[in-house]
């Protein structure tokens, strides 16, 4: 998916944990890499869930402004 996005000049938002693994090699400086520095998968997933909710809130606010909270 990252390679396909790069071929289309898209910015990638990557959620990883434990150092990012092989994905680190594919990401460019303009990409967004949210890497959770934890060893436990459950903790990594908890932080990913929080990040996804924050991203969704940002999209809602961008599209609907203050009315997104109603």
Image: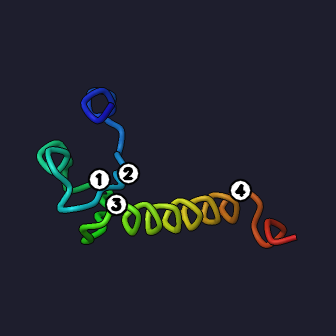
Quadrant for residue 17, please give it: bottom left
Which residue is drawn at the image coordinates 64% and 65% (left, top)? 57
Q: What's the CA distance linking mark 3 and mark 2?
A: 19 Å
* Front: mark 2 or 4: 2
Q: Which residue is mark 1?
A: 31
Labelled pair 1, 2 in contact (Cβ < 8 Å): yes
Residue marked by disc 4: 63
The residue that disc 2 covers is 13
Pick whichever, 63 or 34, lies toward us.
34
Give the CA distance from mark 1 to mark 4. 22 Å
Going from N to C along the chain, the mark reached first, 3 or 4, is 3
Residue 14, percent across and down?
Answer: 34, 51
- Pick the quarter of the image with the N terminus: top left
Q: Which residue is mark 3?
A: 41
Q: Which mark is first along the chain, 2 or 3? A: 2
Which is more foreground, mark 3 or mark 2?
3
For image coordinates 56% across by 67% down, the residue present is 54
Where residue 24 sits in the image (x, y, percent)? Answer: 16, 51
Image coords of residue 8 (percent x, y): 33, 28
Q: Locate residue 15: give its quadrant.
A: bottom left
Q: x%, y% of residue 7?
A: 27, 27
Mark 2 or mark 4: which comes first in sequence?
A: 2
What secondary structure is found at the residue carrying circle 4? helix
Residue drawn 77% across the image and 60% down it:
64
């Amino acid at each position: 998916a990252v390679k396909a996005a790069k071929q289309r000049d898209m910015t990638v938002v990557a959620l990883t944990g434990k150092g990012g693994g092989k994905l680190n090699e594919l990401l460019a400086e303009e990409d967004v890499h949210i890497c959770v520095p934890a060893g436990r998968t459950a903790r990594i997933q908890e932080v990913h869930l929080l990040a996804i909710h924050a991203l969704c809130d940002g999209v809602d606010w961008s599209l609907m402004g203050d009315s997104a909270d109603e």
